[in-house]
Image (cartoon, grey):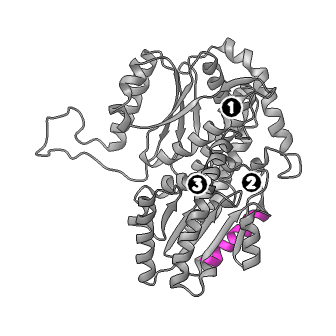
Amino acid sequence: MIAFQYKKIARISSKQIKQMQRDAASALAPLRASLKKKPYTDEFASLHLPSDKKYQQRIASLVAEKKRLGVDVLVVIGIGGSNLGSMALQEALTGKFHNELYSPKVYYADTVDPDKTADILCLVRTALEKKQRVLINCITKSGSTTETIAHLHVFFSLLKKYRSDYKKYVVFTTDKGSPLWNLAVREGFDVLEIPALVGGRYSVFSAVGQFPLGLLGSNVSKLLKGARDMRTRCLLPVLRNPAAMSAMILAAHYTRSARIHDLFMFSADLESVGKWYRQLMGESIGKEHDLLGNKVYCGMTPTVSIGSTDLHSMAQLYLGGPFDKCTAFVTVQRANNSVRVPKNSVIKGLVADIEGKTYAQVLQAIVEGTQVAYQKAKRPFIDIRLPDKSEESLGALLQLFEMQMMILGSLLNVNPFDQPSVEKYKKETRRLLRS
């Protein structure tokens, strides 16, 4: 089970917690109420995903069908909420060197950077020339995301050149009734539904994440179990609830002008979880208007740091700079592998007390040393400890963060489910493309 600690380190008093407790309890009420309703009928729709067995079975059935094709390469086309969650979980589960160590390989086509796209095209073309089986999973909630549809044109054209049965190697994931959904139905492509009221940044437990992760061999059932178990925990009374407590701590520090929230990941494979969280917080809390329509320009800027790497680039700022940050340390208690510094090496005497120790021991000393330094410098933080990087633990972590954000939105009096300002750049992009 994930451990959550805040006492004596979050720099928030029991009096402040007591003052905020009623508001946090009020924020929890609609989450509890939503789970008693018909699924997917309000803005808390994503809470139903981990326990929707029929939906999971439909996705698992298509995963099994596509696995029988013997897929060698998966191309995930999508951007933002359409790929950040699956990328985060895939990297956390199988590491940054997945393509060198595992099959199927996976490539993420998101931004329309011509050089990055050309590199992926080269790799996919090479695989097709070798008679390898390439499957495209195109994900867009709206069915009309500019970058995603551009990629679909390019990669679909390439696939069609090499396979006459190309339709078997394409899966669309989108809202029912979207332009992409309608195309899939009309042309006979496989298509998976994203429930309409599940927003992109809350969609990782939908087909958006379940299909690509299942195809890559992850245990989706355990992922969803972890999410369900954490959902139960995050519906408990406030003082026993990690989502509510962490949301209260962030809200309290926001009122003290701590407008930066750093997710300090002491596992390199969790970096993309931090990038997923950036979107979750950025879009959920960054709002021009509050719930009453007042201009408030609310927001905490989410950042992600990797331990111990970023201690060698950012620690000076974090420990000596302005008091405008609240940090969440995320650590993993059991790594997947063990590496030990040799004893009696020719290279000795350069750093004291490391010979014979495992890397896990060295990293733990760095974690504890960093947290002591934060305490002495009066820098607020919370401590989140994963038992391991299993599907169950990661499902729990992402569910915790999603529910934290729902509660934080309420505490800051903003809507954590919309993103009206995102449309501003999209509108200008469409205008420029027309011209």
Q: How many marks?
A: 3
Q: Camera-side residue: 1 or 54?
A: 54
Q: Is residue 313 above or below residue 1?
A: above
Taking the magenta stretch, the answer to whether it contains residue 57 is: yes
Q: Which residue is mark 2?
A: 49
SS at circle 3: loop
**Residue 110: % across, % down:** 53, 57
Of the residues shown, which amino acid type is indicated by label 3? Ile
Q: Main secondary structure of the magenta part?
A: helix
Q: Camera-side residue: 17 or 130?
A: 130
Q: Which residue is mark 3?
A: 79
Of the residues shown, which amino acid type is indicated by label 2? Leu
Looking at the rendered image, the disc whose residue lies closer to the viewer, 1 or 2, is 1
For the residues labelled 3 and 1, the Cα–Cα distance comes to 21 Å
Segment tinted magenta in the rendering: 54-66
Q: Which residue is mark 1?
A: 287
Quarter holding residue 180: bottom right
Q: Is residue 168 above or below residue 146?
A: below
Is any atom of residue 78 visible in this view?
no
Of the residues shown, which amino acid type is indicated by label 1? Lys
In primary-sequence order, the first of circles 3 and 1 is 3
